[in-house]
Image (tube, coloured by chain):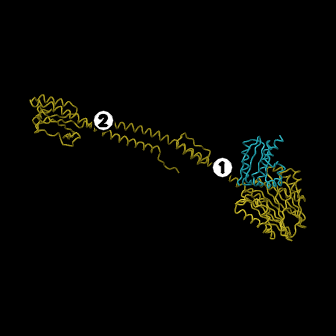
Chain colours: A cyan, B yellow
């Protein structure tokens, strides 16, 4: 399945849904797509919905770390949600779990934003 | 270069002028014909009326021989325009009355050479002096129907010619005015056409000289405006293509530099490990990534074994790889504990990379004396070990976060160290995700399971055979699909 990026809004939180495979050939599509969404929505709280993402390569994790870093620097935030088991394994292996928060479902991720603020 | 071109202006003027001339000529001929017909018609009616008038009034005077009265009627008839002669002759042709009284009693003769008959059955003659005369006749009948003779009246036919001459002059005048107007119109029209064409030609010339920012501006909203729009969008397209080409060349140059950096860092030969053999393979992807491997000689028969993968591409990845290689070589020599080596590497790179890029590193220290191996991993996937004695494959994946993601304390806390013993016939197989994530044309990825099977198959052979076997299996699996990530394979085996 080709990579795809879609957006959804839940109150003040932007949910970005990813589908397909995120590897070195599609990472540019993610970066451009995310930049377009964040350019339109502004610095906000984001949730990346990874339910439809079948594969994430190291290039994909780098892209997540980059977007997270950018948003944090300008006062926004990014959380991951609904990761598949394979992705979860790499998420912990590489150490991204020590940087970006992850939740089982998008709902939980959205709720976790509400708790903090 | 410059060719002689005929002007569109001259061409337009020639066409319009010939059209005008043709139209006025046709109109002129038509008008002349109509004019000629109507004039002839009018003359015939008039001539007939004059002749009949004579015939009606003169009979009695001739009968009673009132010659003077008869002559008077003829003289009156002569007052009519163009009348050249008027006479009455009897049936034998002897002239009974004539406007020229000397001709009385002489024989009637036609006024000249007979030319043709008019539609009104009157005859046209040409006189000796070259003049054309149209002759009208009418029977002269007295009361009680006594026929006396025939009245002849000759009217100058050249009257029509003179009247037509005036029409000619009118037509020439109208033609002249029409030509003047058409020349003026053609001039304005051709100017309206040629001006934007000159602007287009000039614009195309400027663009041709290399100024791709030039815009052709003409006011016309017609086809020429369309052409200008097309030329402008062509220029824009050329500019985009040029920029894309510049970008492509820059990218190509960058990849070339990245490849040179990477190539300079990868070992060309391995240190002598006595009872151990080493084989490696490396092939960069089109957009070069940052794979790196090395065998670093340490003290007392120990060697540091490295397999690393910098996420990212091109020069940035190559530069991080350079730093990574430098720090690793320095720290591995200074620190016997592999955990310390990777912790120092993380500390060193974290500030440089700043969270925007990371590297997975597998690092092991092998003691060729006793065959012990101590391995750590910074987010790198598992390595495989072939056991010669049992012909089986084991997989090891020490825990640890990737380099450049976590801060020192957290990074150190996660690091796990695994030790194992390597016996004769055992082999280590290390590679990057260019192998495990190699994509097949029909979908799916190579994965770790296939790598295990490959090692299982070739583990009993040489390290070179293990490396080539894995590569062959990957290529068979991908089926010619373009390699999207760098591929690095390193195998170390104990032979004795």
Which x, y percent locates residue B301?
89, 65
Quick check: marks 2 and 1 in contact, CB under 8 Å?
A: no
Between B195 and B275, the residue placed more toward the observer is B275
Which x, y percent locates residue B360?
81, 56
Q: Are marks 2 and 1 on the same chain?
A: yes
In the image, B80: left or right of B223? left
Dot 2 or dot 1, earlier in sequence: 2
In the image, A43: left or right of B57? right
Between B256 and A99, the residue placed more toward the observer is A99
Name the chain under label 2.
B
Under tag 2, what secondary structure?
helix
Under tag 1, what secondary structure?
helix
**Distance from the alpha carbon under mark 2 to that under mark 1:** 75 Å
Q: Is residue B67 above or below residue B452?
A: above
Query: In which quadrant is the C terminus of chain B drawn?
Result: bottom right
The residue labelled by disc 2 is B166
Which x, y percent locates residue B199?
54, 43
The residue labelled by disc 1 is B243
Q: Is residue A44 above or below residue B446?
A: above
């Amino acid at each position: 399945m080709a990579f795809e990026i879609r957006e959804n809004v839940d109150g003040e939180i932007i949910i970005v849904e990813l589908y397909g495979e995120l590897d070195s050939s599609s990472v540019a599509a993610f970066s451009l797509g995310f930049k377009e969404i964040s350019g339109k929505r502004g610095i906000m709280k984001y949730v990346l919905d990874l339910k439809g993402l079948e594969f994430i390569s190291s290039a994909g994790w780098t892209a997540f770390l980059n977007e997270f870093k950018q948003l944090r620097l300008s006062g926004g935030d990014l959380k991951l949600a609904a990761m598949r088991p394979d992705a979860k394994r790499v998420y912990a292996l590489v150490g991204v779990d020590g940087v970006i928060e992850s939740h089982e479902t998008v709902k939980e991720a959205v709720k976790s934003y509400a708790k903090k603020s | 270069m410059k060719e002689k071109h005929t002007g569109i202006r001259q061409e337009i003027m020639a066409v319009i002028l010939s059209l005008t001339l043709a139209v006025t000529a046709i109109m002129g001929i038509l008008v002349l014909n109509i004019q000629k017909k109507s004039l002839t018609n009018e003359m015939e009616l008039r001539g007939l009326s004059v002749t009949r008038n004579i015939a009606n009034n003169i009979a009695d005077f001739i009968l009673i021989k009132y010659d003077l009265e008869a002559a008077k009627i003829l003289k009156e008839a002569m007052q009519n325009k163009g009348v050249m002669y008027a006479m009455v002759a009897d049936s034998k042709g002897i002239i009974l009355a004539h406007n020229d009284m000397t001709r009385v009693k002489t024989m009637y003769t036609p006024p000249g050479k007979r030319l043709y008959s008019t539609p009104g059955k009157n005859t046209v003659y040409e006189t000796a002096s070259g003049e054309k005369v149209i002759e009208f006749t009418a029977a002269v009948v007295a009361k009680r129907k006594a026929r006396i003779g025939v009245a002849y009246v000759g009217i100058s036919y050249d009257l029509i010619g003179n009247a037509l001459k005036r029409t000619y002059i009118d037509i020439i005048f109208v033609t002249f005015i029409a030509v003047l107007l058409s020349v003026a119109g053609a001039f304005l029209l051709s100017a309206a056409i040629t001006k934007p064409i000159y602007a287009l030609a000039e614009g195309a010339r400027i663009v041709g000289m290399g100024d791709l920012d030039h815009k052709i501006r003409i006011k016309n909203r017609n086809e020429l405006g369309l052409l200008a729009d097309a030329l402008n969008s062509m220029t824009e397209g050329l500019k985009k293509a040029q920029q894309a080409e510049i970008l492509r060349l820059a990218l190509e140059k960058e990849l070339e530099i990245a490849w040179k950096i990477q190539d300079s860092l990868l070992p060309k030969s391995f240190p002598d490990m006595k009872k151990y053999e080493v084989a490696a393979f490396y092939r960069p992807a089109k957009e070069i990534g940052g794979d790196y491997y090395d065998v670093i000689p340490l003290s007392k028969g120990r060697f540091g074994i490295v397999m690393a993968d910098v996420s990212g591409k091109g020069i940035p990845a190559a530069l991080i790889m350079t730093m990574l290689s430098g720090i690793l070589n320095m720290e591995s020599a200074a620190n016997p504990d592999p955990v310390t080596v990777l912790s120092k590497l993380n500390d060193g790179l974290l500030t440089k990379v700043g969270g925007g890029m990371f590297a997975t590193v597998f690092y092991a220290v092998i003691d060729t004396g006793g065959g012990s191996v101590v391995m750590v991993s910074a987010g790198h996937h598992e390595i495989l070990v072939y056991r010669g004695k049992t012909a089986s494959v084991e997989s090891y994946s020490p825990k640890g976060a990737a380099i450049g993601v976590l801060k020192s304390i957290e990074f150190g806390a996660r690091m796990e160290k695994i030790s194992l013993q390597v016996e004769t016939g055992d082999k280590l197989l290390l590679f990057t995700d260019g192998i495990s994530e190699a994509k097949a044309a029909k979908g799916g990825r190579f994965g770790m399971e296939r790598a295990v099977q490959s090692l299982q198959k070739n583990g009993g052979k040489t390290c070179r055979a293990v490396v080539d076997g894995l590569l062959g299996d990957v290529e068979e699996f991908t089926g010619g699909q373009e390699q999207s990530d760098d591929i690095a394979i390193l195998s170390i085996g104990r032979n004795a």
